[in-house]
Image (cartoon, rainbow, N blue to C red):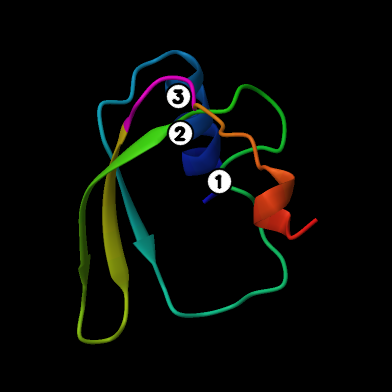
Amino acid sequence: MRGSGKLMRFLLDNDLVDEMRLLVFPVVVGQGTRLFPNRGPDRALELRETRATPSGVTVQVYRPAGRPQYAGVSTEVLGR
């Protein structure tokens, strides 16, 4: 899977991705290679479709949506 992760990052970095289909398996693992690196620009993704299989796997379809917009958090929300 290392090659596919590198390929995905290259395609994202060069704006060559129209759509991503992520399959999420209901398993927690303590190690592995990250799909998205902890460095580089943030990217917004628009959720276009989601469905679950009988075994609990979810299929999520995303499209890149440019740079994310972050909202500030007021102290009122934090209870301060």
Q: Residue 8 at x, y = what percent?
A: 45, 33
Q: Residues within 10 Å of mark 3 (few under 14, many from 20)?
A: some
Check contact, mark 2 vs mark 3: CB within 8 A: yes
Q: Quadrant of residue 59?
A: bottom left
Name above or below for residue 66 compared with residue 76: above
- Please name whichever residue, 69 or 43, is drawn nearer the observer in this view of the structure: 69
Check contact, mark 1 vs mark 2: CB within 8 A: yes
Q: Residue 46 at x, y = what percent?
A: 31, 38
Q: Report the side of 53 relative to 64 (left or right).
A: left
Mark 1 residue type: Leu
Q: Residue 76 at x, y = what percent?
A: 68, 51
Name above or below for residue 38 compared with residue 23: above
Q: Which residues are magenta?
A: 64-68
Q: Is residue 65 magenta?
A: yes
Q: Which residue is mark 2?
A: 8
Q: Which residue is mark 3?
A: 12
Q: Quadrant of residue 63?
A: top left
Q: CA distance from mark 2 to mark 3?
A: 6 Å
Q: Quadrant of the C terminus?
A: bottom right
Q: Residue furthest right?
A: 80
Q: Helix, strand, or loop for circle 2?
A: helix
Q: Earlier in the sequence, mark 3 or mark 1?
A: 3
Q: Residue at x 74, y 47 (%)?
A: 75
Mark 3 residue type: Leu
Q: Nearer the viewer, mark 2 or mark 3?
A: 3
Q: Report the side of 28 relative to 54 (left or right).
A: right
Q: Which residue is mark 1?
A: 35
Q: Residues within 10 Å of mark 1 (few under 14, many from 20)?
A: few
Q: Helix, strand, or loop for circle 1?
A: loop
Q: Residue furthest top?
A: 14
Q: Residue at x 51, y 51 (%)?
A: 1
